[in-house]
Amino acid sequence: MKETDNIFATALEKVPDFVFNEDVVNVFPDMIKRSVPGYPTIVENIGVIAAQYAQPYSLLYDLGCSLGAVTQALRRHVKQPDCRILAIDNSAPMVQRCQEYLTAQQAMYQELVPTQVIQDDIVTMDWQAASVITMNFTLQFIKPEQRLEILKNIYNILDKKGALLLSEKVRFDDSHAQHILNDLHLAFKRANGYSELEIAQKRTAIENVMKIDTLAIHQQRLHDAGFSKVTVWFQCLNFISLIALP
Ligand code: GEK
């Protein structure tokens, strides 16, 4: 059952660092839709874009899959023969619920791309050759000093005709842009029913675990990892989605 996110609705004496635990899993679909502007559009179109880059007989990774929203879009859109998907997340409750959702999807659709959900850490996991890799709001939860190494690993295993699809919340060096887009994001959250208390406590919970970069930093890091072309295909307020090509 999908529940409403009220995790930060009552005042906490001390706000702990945010973790992807059972409580978050229970409200996650509601939380991400009310917090990330453009999320449903991004998810659906990642499926469409991935279908353009997926190669026959290849692997697709969904890294930081959470409950498998992107995995489900990949499974429906990718039509190349003999593809398979590995959906990876390091949160045990996420992986368990993701598996349940994917089983339910299988009962509703035919000819979905076969998928395995695995609990693993993208910082330390073993990599296999792949044609599409999606990281939908996952890199931002990795320590900044570990991000380049992950992107290098991705570049090294990525098919030359494949793509990395990367979505992130970003900040802006330009103080006017930072101010206006951050304020508009807060307005988006208020419009979706979050109170000032919820917004403030969530910010405290997340500030140590989610360090966001500018678009320029992402572009430079992707180039440093080896990617030759980096294109923004979507932006809504301070949330962007990129296609990175080898
Ligand atoms: C979606 N992509 O619905 N290794 C593996 N997974 C990790 C790691 C790690 N080191 N660190 C964090 N995660 C999804 C949304 S949520 C984004 C992705 C958000 C996982 C973490 O457990 C969580 O499930 C996910 O990355 C980030 O399109 O909540 O804003």
Image (tube, rainbow, N blue to C red):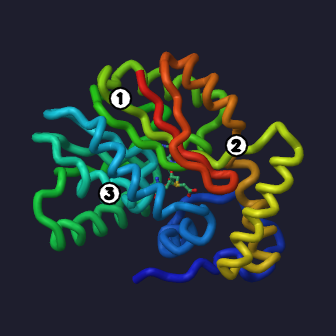
| Cα separation between marks 2 and 3 | 26 Å
Please name the residue that numbered disc 2 is placed on.
212
Q: Secondary structure at mark 2?
A: loop
- Residue 122 appears at what percent x and percent y? 45, 37
49 or 100: nearer the viewer: 49
Please name the residue that numbered disc 1 is placed on.
126
Specify the quadrant of the image occupied by residue 49: top left
Q: In the image, is the residue at mark 2 within 8 Å of ligand 1 by its beta carbon?
A: no
Residue 73, label in figure: 3
Amino acid of disc 2: Ile
Check disc 1: other Cα within 10 Å, few if <14, some if 14-19, many if 20+: few
Quick check: 16 above or below 129?
A: below
- Residue 166 appears at what percent x and percent y? 50, 40
| Cα separation between marks 1 and 2 | 26 Å
Horizontally, residue 3 falls left or right of residue 197, namely: left
Residue at (52%, 19%) from the top-left corner? 225
Quadrant for the C terminus in the image: top left
Q: Secondary structure at mark 3?
A: helix
Check disc 3: other Cα within 10 Å, few if <14, some if 14-19, many if 20+: some
Q: Secondary structure at mark 1?
A: loop
Mark 3 or mark 1: which comes first in sequence?
Answer: 3
Q: In the image, is the residue at mark 3 within 8 Å of ligand 1 by its beta carbon?
A: no
Amino acid of disc 3: Ala
Quadrant for the N terminus in the image: bottom left
Residue at (68%, 29%) from the top-left corner? 217
Amino acid of disc 1: Asp
